[in-house]
């Protein structure tokens, strides 16, 4: 039946355990399994089997990544225009803390219908995701496997609209250095609002009017007019009622930082040219990816996670959301069987080693008694010296000459 060692579930039930456990809360997955198949399993067992499947999936992905890095392949049908957007979202941890889960969204960009103003739009299709809890540098290498699958190296153009985070740019340097980098327009608008609050006062009509005018100018005219307007704001300085920056910066320093934010990313602000080429100017596929991959499973009411449980569930979530579950499961199941056999062999070796009790060493052989010393001949008998007396054996005179 292909059962794992010491397990009672068939491969089909094991597959449903993992898929349900990665899609909904473990208690709900337990109830669904009982309702659909009549299989009764405890919540603890379902949780343990889901995490085991996730660990196997991580091992399979790591092996595939090693092969891809050693011998890069090519995609069967690379897109003409590919999109890669990267973002992070917060996930609650056990103990009340929060951590960042990083997500990369891949898509093929195709022409869309005209908007209300008759302008050209772009649609993102064939979406796929990679999500992990890991440091930024490692995440860049992790997503390189999906980048090969999606043919980013073979695509005519790769566009990458993102927010202004530096770690995202580092990932792009590794995975898609040729990408056309675009500052996500809603993030740019958010920073314009911060500038307006510093210069004209938070919530004032003048601040709203300035921010609205600059958003339109940036969207329709590009960065040149905006940079001039920002330089004028910097020369004017913050207003008396300007709020401090979010990290406690003085208003003048916060204004300088906002102006530098736009100046550093001037090449990423040419929205009219991007739209004319049919490129997206927003990172919505990454932000919606959080709602598709991360939110439904990791942000439920009352849910808190141990950090080492995040990646096993994330890799299963991505396999499901990418519509690759049927492709992934056979390799995942083979890895679980391999791990099960290895664990069983190790347990057998441990038991056998415990039974190998060393035999006690034999007692030492008894030592033979030392031989008695030879009897000493008597030297004097009846007052007369015997042949053993020194006088009888003493040689002198002619007896000492050679030949005697």
Image (spheres, rainbow, N blue to C red):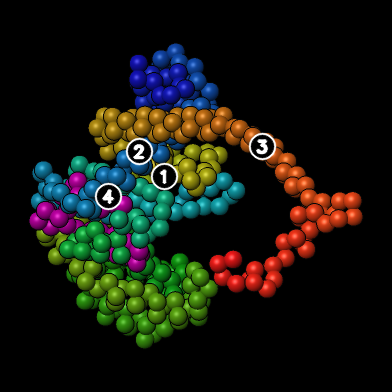
Secondary-structure class at tag 1: helix
Coordinates of residue 332 in the picture (x, y in percent): 32, 33
- Looking at the rendered image, the disc whose residue lies closer to the viewer, 3 or 2, is 3
Q: What whole-number distance in Å separates the C-alpha atoms at marks 1 and 2?
A: 10 Å
- Please check the rendered image and state whether residue 164 is part of the magenta-colored stretch, yes or no: yes
Q: Residue 201, position in %: x, y? A: 46, 73
Residue at which label 4 appears: 66
User: Which of pointers 1 and 2 lies earlier in the amino acid sequence?
Assistant: 2
- Which residue was labeled with disc 2? 57
Q: Residue furthest front?
A: 398
| Residue underneath mark 1 | 311
**Where, quadrant-wise, is the C terminus in this rendering?**
bottom right
Mark 2 and mark 4: Cα distance apart in space: 14 Å
What segment carries the magenta color?
142-169
Name the residue that disc number 3 marks: 365
Q: CA distance from mark 3 to mark 2?
A: 62 Å
- Secondary structure type for disc 2: helix
Q: Nearer the viewer, residue 79 or 263?
A: 79
User: Does the magenta segment cover residue 54?
Assistant: no
Question: Front-most of 394 and 240?
Answer: 394
Q: CA distance from mark 3 to mark 4?
A: 62 Å
Query: Between disc 3 and disc 4, whose residue precedes?
Result: 4
Compared to residue 166, the image places residue 66 above or below, namely above
Nearer to me, 284 or 199: 284
């Amino acid at each position: 039946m292909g059962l794992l060692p010491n397990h009672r579930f068939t491969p089909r039930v094991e597959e449903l355990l993992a898929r349900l456990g990665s899609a909904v809360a473990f208690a709900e997955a337990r109830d669904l399994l009982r309702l659909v198949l009549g299989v009764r399993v405890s919540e603890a067992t379902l949780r343990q089997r889901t995490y085991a499947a996730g660990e196997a999936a991580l091992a399979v992905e790591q092996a595939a990544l090693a092969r891809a890095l050693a011998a890069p392949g090519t995609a069967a049908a690379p897109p003409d225009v590919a999109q890669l957007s990267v973002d992070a979202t917060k996930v609650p941890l056990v103990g009340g803390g929060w951590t960042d889960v990083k997500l990369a969204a891949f898509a093929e960009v195709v022409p869309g219908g005209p908007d209300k103003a008759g302008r050209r739009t772009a649609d993102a299709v064939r979406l796929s995701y990679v999500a992990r809890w890991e440091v930024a540098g490692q995440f860049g290498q992790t997503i390189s496997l999906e980048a090969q699958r999606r043919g980013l190296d073979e695509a005519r153009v790769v566009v990458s609209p993102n927010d202004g985070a530096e770690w995202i740019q580092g990932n792009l340097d590794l995975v898609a250095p040729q990408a056309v980098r675009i500052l996500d327009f809603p993030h740019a608008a958010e920073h314009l609002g911060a500038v307006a609050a510093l210069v004209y006062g938070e919530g004032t009509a003048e601040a709203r009017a300035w921010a609205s005018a600059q958003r339109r100018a940036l969207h329709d005219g590009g960065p040149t007019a905006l940079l001039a307007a920002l330089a004028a704001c910097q020369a004017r300085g913050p207003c008396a009622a300007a709020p401090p920056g979010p990290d406690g910066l003085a208003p003048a320093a916060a204004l300088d930082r906002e102006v530098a934010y736009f100046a550093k990313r001037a090449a990423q602000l040419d929205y009219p040219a991007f739209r004319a080429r049919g490129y997206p100017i927003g990172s919505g596929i990454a932000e919606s990816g959080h709602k598709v991959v991360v939110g439904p499973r990791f942000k439920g009411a009352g849910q808190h996670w141990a950090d080492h449980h995040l990646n096993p569930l994330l890799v299963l979530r991505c396999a499901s959301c990418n519509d690759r579950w049927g492709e992934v499961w056979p390799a995942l199941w083979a890895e679980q069987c391999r791990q099960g056999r290895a664990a069983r062999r190790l347990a057998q070796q441990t038991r056998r080693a415990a039974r190998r009790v060393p035999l006690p060493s034999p007692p030492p052989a008894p030592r033979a008694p030392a031989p008695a010393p030879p009897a000493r001949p008597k030297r004097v008998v009846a007052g007369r010296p015997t042949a053993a007396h020194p006088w009888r054996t003493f040689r002198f005179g002619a007896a000492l000459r050679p030949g005697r």
